[in-house]
C-alpha cells in the first residue's frame, strides 16, 4: 500500500518539478555564448498610468529599444505602486510623479540617479455647466473648497498615485477633510477614473496629458488649470539602487535615464501629441534649462 | 453620439479587430491559452495522483488533505496572487528565482488555484464508480494497481470534466495573474493598439486595462474571444459529462 502511494504521488510531482527546471534553464542561463546577433536585453520599467495611457511611452521607448537592442517591459500602475515595485526590487527603473514620495524613497536608499525629465499640469475637470463654480476659483484649493461646500460629487483616484497624492495635498491646502456621499474613491488608474467621472458627469482631478488623450471620447471639460502653486506636475525617472538589489539591471537603467534626458529623448517628449492634439502633452525639462 | 451608436460601433470595430487577425489581440489570446494550458497540465499531473491516493489509500493526514482540497476549491484568486507576489518579488523569500512578472509566475499562481478544483471534481468522479467494478478486479486476482486502472477507465469522463473545469477557471481568472504577471505588453501597445505584442497580458487582464483606457472596442473584441474560449471549454465539459 505505502509503496503504491509513494509511486503515485512522487513520480508525477518529480516529473513536473523536473519539467519546471528544464524550462527554467535557458532563461536563467547567464553563461551564454559570445554575443553575435544577441537576444535583446530586458529592462523593467514601473511607471504611472499617465505615461502609458497617453501613449508617450510607445513613442519614447521604441527609439531606445531599437537603438540599443533592449526590450522594455512596462508596468503601468500609478506612482504609489510603481515606487513600491521598485522598493521590492521588482523593477529596474521607475518613471513617476510624486515629489514627496520620490524623495522619501531616495532617502531610504531604494533609488538612485533621480533625474528630472518633464512636467505638465494637473487640471480640474467636470461637467460643462460647472455646478460648483470651479471656473471662477482663484486657485485650486479654492476650487476644491467650493466643490466640498456645495457637496457636488467628486471622484478620487484613491490609489496613492501621484495624482491622488496631489489631490490630497490640495484638500489639505483647502483645509477640507473630504468625506461624505459626494466624495467617492474608486482605487483605479487615471483613464478609468476619468471614464467613471465622465459616465456620471462629475468632477475629478486629472493630469493634463491623460485628459487630452481622452478628450474626444468624453464630455467632461477642463474647468480649472495652470495654477503654479497647486497644480504643477513634475515627472522624474530614477534607477533602483543596485546596492540594495544586486540583480537589477542598473547599467541598462542608467542608459535609459541618460536617453530620456538626452536631447533626443527630450525632443520626442516635447513633440509628442502635437500632431494629434495640437499641443504637446508634456513639457521636457530641457525647455526650462534653455529659458 | 447616442449610447446605442457607441455600443454598435464598438461591436463592429471588435469584429474588425478579430477578423483582421490583429497581432496584438492574437498575442494576448496566445498568452492566455499558453499560461492557462500549462497551469492545467501541471495541475492535472498533481491532482490525479492526489485524487487516487485520497480515494484508495488510508494514510495519516488524509482527512486534513480532503479539507485542504475543499478549502482550496474556493480560494479567492486575488489572495493567491498576493501570496505568490510576496513570495516571488526580489525582496521576498523566493526572489532569487527571478520569476516575478513572468509567464512562469502566472502559471504558478493558476496552478495553485486550479489544482484543488481538479482534485475535488476528480474525487467525486472516482467516488461515483460503482463498488462492484473494484470488487471484480480483486476477484480476478488483481492488485491495487489494477483496481486503480479499472477505476481510471470507469471515471475517465468525470476526470476529463474535472480537467476542463480547471481550464475554464484558469482562463476566466484575472485577480491572481494581474498581480503576479503585471499585465505587460511590449512597446507599441502600451498606449493603444499597435504592433507591440503581449508578454504577460491575457484576455482577462487586457480587458481591465483597455477598459480603463476607455478603449471599449478592443475590450469587446477581447471579451468575445474570451467568452468563445470559455464557452467551448464548457461545451466540451458538458459533452463528456453526458457520456458519463
Image: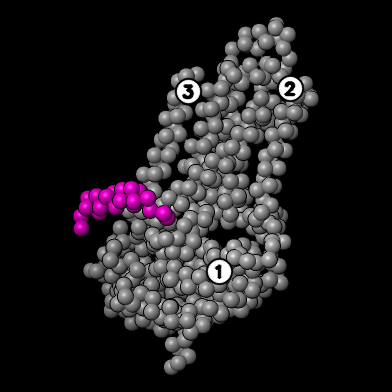
User: What segment is highlighted magenta in the picture?
Assistant: B1-24
Please rate how many residues cluster around mark 2, counting C-alpha atoms within 10 Å: few if below 14, some from 14 to 19, many from 20: few
Say if the magenta span includes residue A249. no
Under tag 2, what secondary structure?
Answer: loop
Q: Any mark on residue A25, and which?
A: none
Image-based side of A261 in relation to A124, left or right: right
Residue that appears at 48% across and 84% down: A263
Task: Classify residue A251 by image quadrant.
Answer: bottom right
Q: Nearer the viewer, residue B147 or A34?
A: A34
Q: Chain of mark 1?
A: A
* Quarter occupied by residue A167: bottom left
Residue A69 badge: 1
Q: Output the chain of dot 2.
A: B
Mark 1 and 2 residues: CB-CB less than 8 Å, in contact? no
**x, y percentage for residue A266?**
46, 81
Relative to residue B128, is residue A119 drawn left or right?
Answer: left
Q: Which residue is mark 2?
A: B58
Determine whether the residue tagged by mark 1 lies in a helix, strand or loop.
Answer: loop
Rendered-image quadrant of the N terminus of chain B: bottom left
Chain holding disc 3: B
Q: Main secondary structure of the magenta part?
A: helix
Q: Which image quarter: residue A276?
A: bottom left
Q: Which residue is mark 3?
A: B241
Percent across and percent down for residue B141 are: 73, 8
Give the image location of residue A81, x and y in percent. Answer: 54, 63
Amino acid at each position: 500500500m505505502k509503496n503504491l502511494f509513494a509511486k503515485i504521488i512522487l513520480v508525477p510531482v518529480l516529473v513536473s518539478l523536473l519539467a519546471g527546471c528544464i524550462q527554467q534553464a535557458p532563461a536563467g542561463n547567464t553563461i551564454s555564448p559570445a554575443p553575435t546577433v544577441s537576444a535583446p536585453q530586458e529592462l523593467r520599467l514601473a511607471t504611472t498610468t499617465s505615461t502609458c495611457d497617453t501613449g508617450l511611452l510607445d513613442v519614447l521607448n521604441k527609439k531606445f529599444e531599437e537603438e540599443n537592442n533592449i526590450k522594455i517591459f512596462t508596468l503601468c500602475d500609478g506612482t504609489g505602486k510603481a515606487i513600491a515595485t521598485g522598493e521590492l526590487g521588482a523593477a529596474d527603473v521607475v518613471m513617476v510623479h510624486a515629489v514627496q514620495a520620490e524623495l522619501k524613497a531616495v532617502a531610504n536608499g531604494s533609488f538612485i540617479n533621480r533625474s528630472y525629465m518633464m512636467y505638465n499640469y494637473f487640471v480640474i475637470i467636470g461637467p460643462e455647466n460647472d455646478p460648483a463654480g470651479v471656473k471662477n476659483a482663484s486657485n485650486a484649493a479654492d476650487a476644491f473648497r467650493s466643490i466640498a461646500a456645495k457637496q457636488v460629487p467628486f471622484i478620487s483616484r484613491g490609489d496613492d498615485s501621484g495624482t491622488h497624492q496631489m489631490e490630497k495635498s490640495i484638500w489639505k491646502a483647502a483645509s477640507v477633510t473630504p468625506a461624505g456621499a459626494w466624495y467617492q474613491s474608486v482605487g483605479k488608474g487615471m483613464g478609468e477614473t476619468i471614464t467613471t467621472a465622465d459616465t456620471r458627469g462629475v468632477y475629478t482631478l486629472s493630469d493634463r496629458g491623460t485628459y487630452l488623450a481622452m478628450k474626444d471620447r468624453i464630455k467632461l471639460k477642463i474647468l480649472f488649470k495652470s495654477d503654479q502653486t497647486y497644480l504643477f506636475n513634475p515627472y522624474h525617472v530614477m534607477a533602483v539602487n543596485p546596492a540594495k538589489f544586486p540583480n537589477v539591471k542598473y547599467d541598462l537603467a542608467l542608459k535609459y535615464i541618460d536617453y530620456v534626458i538626452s536631447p533626443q529623448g527630450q525632443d520626442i517628449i516635447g513633440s509628442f501629441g502635437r500632431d494629434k492634439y495640437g499641443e504637446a502633452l508634456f513639457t521636457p525639462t530641457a525647455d526650462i534649462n534653455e529659458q | 453620439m447616442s449610447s446605442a451608436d457607441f455600443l454598435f460601433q464598438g461591436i463592429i470595430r471588435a469584429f474588425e479587430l478579430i477578423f483582421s487577425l490583429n497581432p496584438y489581440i492574437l498575442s494576448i489570446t496566445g498568452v492566455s491559452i499558453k499560461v492557462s494550458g500549462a497551469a492545467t497540465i501541471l495541475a492535472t499531473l498533481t491532482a490525479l495522483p492526489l485524487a487516487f491516493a485520497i480515494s484508495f489509500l488510508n494514510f495519516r493526514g488524509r482527512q486534513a488533505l480532503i479539507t485542504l482540497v475543499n478549502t482550496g476549491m474556493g480560494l479567492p484568486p486575488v489572495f493567491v496572487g498576493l501570496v505568490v507576489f510576496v513570495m516571488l518579488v526580489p525582496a521576498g523569500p523566493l526572489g532569487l528565482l527571478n520569476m516575478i512578472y513572468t509567464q512562469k509566475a502566472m502559471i504558478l499562481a493558476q496552478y495553485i488555484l486550479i489544482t484543488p478544483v481538479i482534485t475535488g471534481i476528480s474525487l467525486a468522479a472516482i467516488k461515483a464508480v460503482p463498488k462492484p467494478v473494484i470488487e471484480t478486479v480483486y476477484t480476478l486476482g488483481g492488485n491495487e494497481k489494477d483496481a486503480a486502472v479499472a477505476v481510471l477507465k470507469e471515471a475517465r469522463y468525470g476526470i476529463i470534466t474535472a480537467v476542463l473545469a480547471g481550464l475554464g477557471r484558469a482562463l476566466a481568472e484575472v485577480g491572481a495573474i494581474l498581480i503576479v504577471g503585471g499585465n505587460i505588453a511590449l512597446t507599441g501597445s502600451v498606449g493603444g493598439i499597435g504592433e507591440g505584442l503581449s508578454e504577460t497580458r491575457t484576455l482577462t487582464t487586457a480587458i481591465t486595462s483597455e477598459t480603463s483606457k476607455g478603449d471599449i472596442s478592443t475590450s469587446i473584441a477581447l471579451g468575445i474571444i474570451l467568452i468563445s474560449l470559455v464557452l467551448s471549454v464548457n461545451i466540451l465539459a458538458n459533452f463528456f459529462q453526458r457520456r458519463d
